Amino acid sequence: MLKNVMLKFETHAHCLCSGCAHLTPEEISKKYKDAGYGGFILTNHCSEIAYNNFWFGDTHKEKIKYFEQVIEQTRFAFSKEKIKFLFSVEVKVCNFDKTYSDYIVYGANAKMLYDNKPLYQLTQEELFRLCEKNNCFMNKVHPFRDGENCGNPQFMHGAESFNGHSHHNNHNDMAKIFCKENHLIEMSGTDTHCFDQPINAGIYVPNSVDNMEQFVDYIFTGKQELICDYDLYHKAYMDYKNKQ
């Protein structure tokens, strides 16, 4: 495949140790193969609930080891489908007013997880400073989803101007304005958790991008073209809402 070929890349998806996800690595890899994606980033949750209940192990080290095992199991499933696989982590930060904000830290590796206390225990600013120190990209996800605190734009590099999780009202129109007004790099992700979610988001990434360091360098340029299927999102959201 030529180096300048652009691949459809999922930037936001979950399985297993996220707790709220219902797809196995084998199921989610087949789902993305059928959708024509060439790249995928697993972004399982690092929240108080996920860490304590779904990252199995008694110690911090054991929990990170289990998190790594899930990554490797998922990597193997995607390798069989010949889809590029990267991983990151979605961190749920508790704000001073007791609300919550979620951030994907692109570039967070196992060493970063081992060497620090559980990332959900950091403030937004502390997480941002850690990202700056480790050349990570801190992406605010679904900033205007019902019940979400959009966070302080001073301490993030980018934000999802489109989140495709069809079980939520994500107010993507407000998210796009938020990015524009605060000069944030725009991102897009499906936020896959369930069988009935259509894959409707992501970004186009050059085929030459093979690892997370290269991915981070690319998105920091802000040149990525977003994949945002608004019609598919709205249809699936209304279908889901009508079933409730």
Image: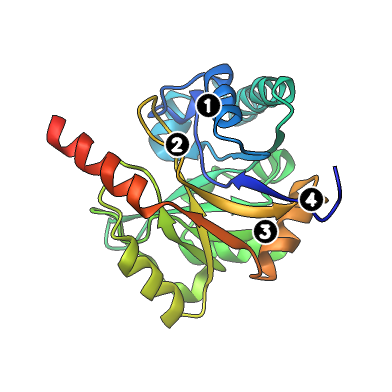
Residue bearing the label numbered 1: 31
Q: Amino acid at mark 2?
A: Thr
Q: Residue furthest right?
A: 2
Point 45% across, 73% down: residue: 179
Residue bearing the label numbered 4: 209
Spatial separation of the CA atoms under disc 2 and disc 3: 22 Å
Q: Are marks 3 and 1 in contact (CB under 8 Å)?
A: no
Q: Is residue 141 visible?
A: yes
Choose mark 2 or mark 1, whichever is in front: 1
Spatial separation of the CA atoms under disc 4 and disc 2: 22 Å
Choose mark 2 or mark 3, whichever is in front: 2
Choose mark 4 or mark 3, whichever is in front: 4
Q: Is residue 112 left or right of residue 15?
A: right
**Label 3 or label 1, whichever comes before in sequence order:** 1
Whether residue 204 is situated above or below residue 30 in the rendered picture: below
Q: Are marks 2 and 1 in contact (CB under 8 Å)?
A: yes
Point 59% across, 54% down: residue: 203
Residue bearing the label numbered 3: 136
Q: Which mark is residue 192?
A: 2
Point 47% across, 32% down: residue: 51
**Label 2 or label 1, whichever comes before in sequence order:** 1
The image shows residue 159 at horizontal and vertical percentages of: 48, 63
**Label 4 or label 2, whichever comes before in sequence order:** 2
Spatial separation of the CA atoms under disc 4 and disc 1: 22 Å
Q: Amino acid at mark 3?
A: Cys
**Mark 3 Cα-neighbour bin, 10 Å: few <14, some 14–19, many ≥20:** many
The image quarter in which residue 206 lies: bottom right
Spatial separation of the CA atoms under disc 4 and disc 3: 16 Å
Q: Is residue 7 left or right of residue 23?
A: right
